[in-house]
Amino acid sequence: MFPERFNMYEYFLESNLEAGRGDKVAVYFRDEKYTYEQIIKETNRVGNVLRELGVEIEDRVLMVLPDCPEFVATWFAITKLGAVITMVNPLLAPQDFDYYLDYTRAKVAVVEASVLERVEPAAKKARYLKNLLVVDRYVDVEHRYPSYSKLVPTAPDCLDTAPTSKDDIAIWLFTSGSTGQPKAAVHLQHDLPYNTECYPKHVLQMTEQDITLGVPKLFFGYATGTNLLFPFRFGASTALFYERSTPETVFAMIERYRPTVLTNVPTMINAMLQLEGDYDLTSLRVCISAGEALPEELYRRWIKRFGVEILDGIGSAELFHIYISNRFGEVRPGSLGRIVPGYEAQIVDAEGRVVPTGEIGTLRVRGDSAAICYWNAHEKSKATFAGDWVTSADLFRVDEEGYYWYAGRSDDMLKVGGIFVSPLEIENCLLQHPAVAECAVVGASDEHGLVKPKAFVVLRAGYEAAEGMIDELQQFAKQRMAPYKYPRLVEFVASLPKNDRGKVDKKLLKG
């Protein structure tokens, strides 16, 4: 599909000049508009600065940036140099940067000024780091490091593209770290373009008329695709915002930029539904959901209130982006849809044998966007990347019509009375109760040391956390599921812990 000499900078960005879109708006940010030609020139200037700071082909560069034009230019500059992109959440705690600087062995880190206070202690003792480049446009912070605002504007706006192969390492995408420290899935130059030829083209049907907006931030591979790479590939535009994603902010950004494609996650879909008021979402032709399965109840509430289709799907850092998705006009609420063209999937048992249709097993996927390994994790790589297949930790069943139904992660499944129970099924049931705003179910030991389902519940305004409510929720579940599945324990909480991708962090609940 791709030539031997290949650099994804040319595929995603420079191709827009060849298509005559140099003057078209590529990025909306605050009151500013950036054309494709402007983004390309800024990319070249950043690339020249990074090269002066010591970045060479195959070097890792760590990006610690919020969503802003500098993120875009830095991302493409790294790949144009033939270096390796690594990107992390700018909201991380100081100790996390010790891990990422040591793990990536980044020679240069590009850091936003508001993050500098948290990054600097780790940077000072990092054995491989040579330079920090500080993006100091948005926050006035005194520092002694190379300044983006001083160096980049005066740098040359011409830069040769590194003569990379389609099989050169291009980017590391970090896993969510649900079972320990995040691992980097190592991707090649052609991996991200491969998915782009499959998912946004065939499922989203993206065109240059689209404007995208994202709830998750660009450091997360899900958003990197839907809110940067996919619109750029098809000559569309993206709207970025620096602020943290809240329901109020997302609604304001939709009103401001009138996007056609909204990248979302179930927790924000729920939060947007909780916010009262009239909001105009008529500019949207689609809302995308991923990160975790979207409960059927949330889908139905969203459609009833906003009338905007949600295409729920599943992707992963190991395969870059979505490989199973619902389609326009063919949505099955509660399912994650069907396999995306260009991919294959199987549901297998513990011995790797394909299970009969309708039975639950482990999902494995095949497609040419698969990573080659986890960095510095040989045994885990062998278990996950076997030949062409990528074996997930996700449990699924597939029905007769090819729709995939999520049953939970293999390490989340509960065995109650000798029978496996999916926490997701209990959560979806409880969400149908009018008092429940959010919930998460984990296994907890009872007084006899036996594992039972425990529900952590966030109540809607107007409902009280009391013994009577616990009994009401338990009876509600018993009437809608097999009796052994109901939550034996219910704990009311003000909020559920989330990881940096917006997913409920169940390992904190289990603790």
Image (spheres, helix red, strand yellow):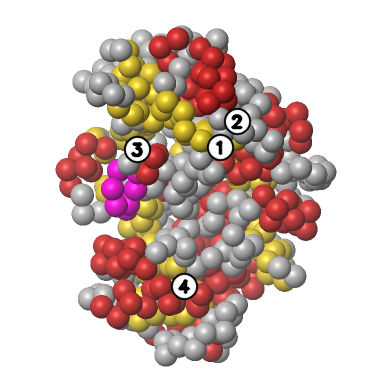
Q: Are marks 2 and 1 in contact (CB under 8 Å)?
A: yes
Q: Amino acid at mark 1?
A: Val
Q: Amino acid at mark 2?
A: Val
Give 278 or 164, whichever is nearer the viewer: 278
Can you say which quadrant of the picture contains the C terminus?
Answer: top left
Residue under label 1, please give it.
Answer: 458
How far across and down, in percent of the image, does residue 150 sit?
A: 53, 89
* SS of the residue under disc 2: strand
Quarter holding residue 307 = top right
Give 59 or 106, whichever is nearer the viewer: 106
Residue under label 3, please give it.
Answer: 510
Mark sitting earlier along the chain (3/1) = 1
How far across and down, in percent of the image, does residue 38 sit?
A: 64, 73
Q: Is residue 271 visible?
A: yes
Separation of residues labelled 1 and 4 (CA atoms): 31 Å
Q: Residue at x 31, y 19 (%)?
A: 415
Residue 73 lies within the magenta run: no
Mark sitting earlier along the chain (2/3) = 2
Mark sitting earlier along the chain (3/4) = 4
Q: Are marks 3 and 1 in contact (CB under 8 Å)?
A: no
Neighbourhood count class around disc 2 (C-alpha, 10 Å): few under 14, some 14–19, many 20 upward: some
Nearest to viewer (mark 3 / mark 4): 3
